[in-house]
Image (cartoon, rainbow, N blue to C red):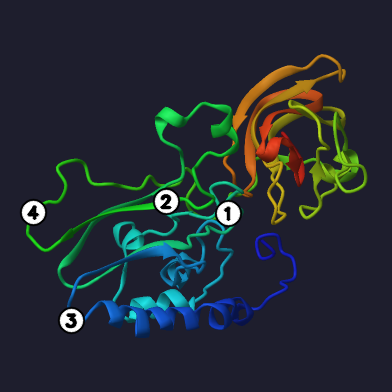
Amino acid sequence: MQNLYGRPRTKTDEQLLDDDRYRRVAMGKAILEKALPSFIGDDDAPVLMGGDLNAWPYPDWAEQFAGARGHAGLVLPWPLTKMFADSGFVDTFRHANPDAGRHPGRTWSSQSGFRSAPGRIDYIFTRGEDVRVLGSRIDDRRLPRHQGSALDQAYPFYSDHSAVVTDVVIRGEGTGPDRPTVADDPEDAPGVWPAPPEGTPVPPAELAATATTFRPGVGDPARAVDGDAFTDYHSDVAPLPHYITVDLGRVRKLSAVRFQPTLAYDMNGTVERGVVQVSDDGTTFTDVAQVEWPRMSAPNDVDMKGASARYLRLRVNYGMGGASALAEIIPYELS
């Protein structure tokens, strides 16, 4: 996130990689050098292995994906997953979905939010000439029969990790299961970090904000219009819906509004559903757009279609944890 927002980095590339070297490589060696040989006498035997490694996938952070969404130009040869690849293991999800930009495979965290960089830390590996990968996908939603309840709203999946689902054939020449092979859906917004909307951003000094609920001091609504993406508006404990209103200083013809979710590690309050509204007098508001946003820290842009207004309001119908939080609200006016 620091790279994405032009902030000085607190860790170098080597310091990031050290998280693997100091905490995980020894565990990987124990699996490869001790555990597997105790299970497998024949080196050619087919192997299936899966689990949460808490480690990033080195192929995803190669040079060719430096411009992928959330990568911020970083090229990082993560040592733990490279060690498995060097030992002949196939990362089934990436094998079936080779484009890490279109298929980032986010598995962490389906419950607490996916943040900026795509956290793919859960794997199914295969090894052996007799194992053939047919397809693979990530599941991060509850089964259809379990969706639509209040529990589903707070917990969209059964775990804080998404599931990796892979179809494989072991030996044989057949086509595999007598059903469609599992396939991953590409992200709605693949590629580079989204470019700013068209129009001219209204300077923060010309904006003011109020909210129906906020944490005094640490969550003041003014933090949502201060031009600093690393400060947040955050609601206090209060029933939803919550409202945060931006005074544009005068009537402006708006092209778009960018809503930047919180960049904090704790994504509590990240807005998932709401309504964007406008007003001339600050009393009577008109709906412009209903919004439904993912549990991610990437910015969300709303087309205002040239609406004229002095006041801009977001009605938060649901935010993670029953709260609402925003790092920035950036109105753009037609030039």
Relative to 176, 298 lies left or right: right
Residue shown at the point (46%, 65%) measured from the top left: 65
Per the image, the residue denoted by label 2 is 163
Say what amino acid the circle numbered 4 marks: Gly
Secondary element under disc 4, as helix, strand or loop, is: loop
Q: Nearer the viewer, residue 54 or 210?
A: 54
Residue 42's tag is: 3
Q: Secondary structure at mark 2?
A: strand
User: At label 3, which amino acid type do we have?
Assistant: Asp
Say left or right for 47 vs 186: left
Q: CA distance from mark 3 to mark 1?
A: 47 Å
Of mark 2 and mark 3, the one earlier in the sequence is 3
Q: Position of residue 201 (x, y in %)?
A: 76, 42
Q: Are marks 3 and 1 in contact (CB under 8 Å)?
A: no
Quadrant of the drawing holding the N terminus: bottom right
On the question of residue 132 being in view, the answer is yes
In the rendered image, which quarter contains the C terminus?
Answer: top right
CA–CA distance between discs 2 and 1?
25 Å
Instruction: Read off the residue under disc 1.
Output: 193
N-term mark: 4 or 3: 3
Residue 174's place in the image compared with 142, above or below, is below
